[in-house]
Image (spheres, rainbow, N blue to C red):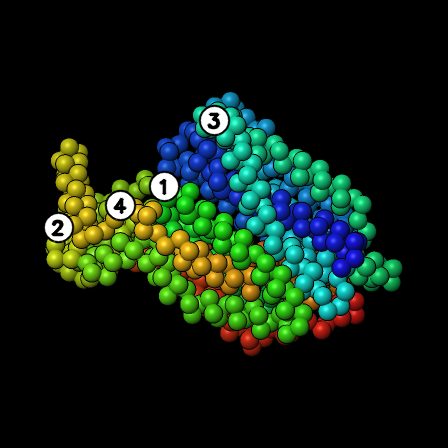
Amino acid sequence: MTGEEKKVIFASSLGTVFEWYDFYLYGTLAVIIGNQFFSALDPASRTIFSLLAFAAGFIVRPFGALVFGRLGDMIGRKYTFLVTILIMGLATFIVGLLPNYNSIGIAAPIILIGLRMLQGLALGGEYGGAATYVAEHAPHGKRGLFTSWIQTTATLGLFLSLMVILGTRTIIGEAAFAEWGWRVPFLLSVVLLGVSVWIRLSMNESPAFKKMKEEGKTSKAPLTESFGQWKNLKIVIIALVGLTMGQAVVWYTGQFYALFFLTGALKVDGATANIMIAVSLILGTPFFIIFGALSDKIGRKPIIMAGCLIAALTYFPLFKALTEAANPDLAAAQAKNKVVVTADSKECSFQFNPTGTVKFTSSCDIAKQVLSAGSVSYDNAEGTGPAKISIGDKVIESYASTGLPADEAKKKDVAFKAAVAAALKDAGYPAKADPAKINKPLVVAILTLLVIYVTMVYGPIAAILVEMFPTRIRYTSMSLPYHIGNGWFGGLLPATGLAIVAQTGNMYNGLWYPIIFALITFVVGMLFVKETKDVDIYAKD
């Protein structure tokens, strides 16, 4: 690899580091941001609205792919993704300067959401530009290797954000950090922005685009060509359903859902869970490069399809093994003393309650809500009369609060929760995972395997997307399926998985979301995706 090629990869990857730096920064500080910008709401709603503001960036990603993809195919890769990193970086920096709700009222959250949407739009053009730029600089036969370096930057972004947050907290203290110190990590991002812009200004346009421009073959209407002509639109749809949809759900399961599962369902403390996730990322990250390079030899398609299939087939046993390794007391209690809710299904409503503001009044809903609040996995059985919770050989009858005076309803609530808690304790259900009993090497091994699945589907994805489309509409065409797949199908995974678990009571049922979409991608990909590793991207104009 020449010095110029290394520079191309480094400059392109910096934008993705920036993306993940901001991603983890905002996610880690969601509670503090909620307190700063949504302080007019109750505490539970603050957090959910701060996460919804975060999600706004995911929703607009595909629109950014259209806007900046079009520019990238018309005026060039270099200048377009110079603009995207400027917008993304300045939006992150301005969050650090933004006055909070107490200072400027409702304008604060409105501006915050606006900045998140700007970041999402810019990001919609950033990844496609970086992947296209690197792939069009790569020698034939090494595109998988070269583009796989971009995929490794999520880990660097994670560690960069954690180091800055931990460093700031340590230096100024927790109280000051919650009050004003949380702004420091956002403000320091300007350093990363400055380095990124300086390096990108010194870069040359990609050889493939330069050649096409010299020959006068650039597209005058990339959006019309990409999505208005069936021959190209068909490939966009295949790329989404047969590649990026499955890649996204496997990615989010391995990187994020596993963390939510550890801290929520298995009740492992956050610090321990984060450390084990971080170690698994360190161990798994080199496989991005391994599978990217391997895809240059045996093809992109077999690696991505194998990743989707293996993940779908092994998620249930792996997550059950994770339970036994991270919280063996919980696993033993579940095996010995199953929890069953027997109720009339007609009085059971949808249990998903992200803000904690829905008031459940039927005996079925109250029983399930108490179990869900304690992250207790349960089975459902049909019955009549008031709902009952069976824990081993103990049966606790629920109650309906409809029509009860407030003080009486409160007494019944306290007594019912105390009875359930006592029965769970007697049946061996732990209030939290015992740190001394966590099999950390096994947990890290399982988490690393989940990350390796991620590297299988994600390592070769940039190369295959670049190779699927003609040079004249490549930036536009590849960006849209990538960001619909990752922004919508992947971004919705944690919330949807949580909703499935809340409704069914089984803590493993959230895995059906990634399993179903990974299998759809496997079937569609095997039938319709063509191998691209030997495609001459210069000829595709």
Q: Is residue 128 above or below residue 274?
A: below
- Marks 1, 3: nearer the viewer: 3
Q: Mark number for residue 173?
A: 3
Mark 4 and mark 1 lie on one chain; the one further toward the N terminus is 1
For the residues labelled 2 and 3, the Cα–Cα distance comes to 47 Å
| Quadrant the C terminus occupies | bottom right
**Amino acid found under the numbered disc labelled 1:** Thr
Residue located 64% across and 69% down the image: 295
| Quadrant the N terminus occupies | bottom right
Residue at numbered disc 4: 431
Residue at numbered disc 2: 397
Q: Is residue 326 visible?
A: yes
Circle 4: element type: loop
Mark 1 and mark 2 lie on one chain; the one further toward the N terminus is 1
Outermost residue on the bottom side: it is 527
Residue located 59% across and 58% down the image: 286
Q: Is residue 53 left or right of residue 44?
A: right
**Amino acid found under the numbered disc labelled 4:** Ala
- Marks 2, 4: nearer the viewer: 4
Residue 493 image offset from top left, x and y in percent:
45, 55
Residue 196 image offset from top left, x and y in percent:
71, 42
Residue located 74% across and 54% down the image: 6
Residue at numbered disc 1: 355
For the residues labelled 1 and 3, the Cα–Cα distance comes to 29 Å
Residue 229 image offset from top left, x and y in percent:
68, 67
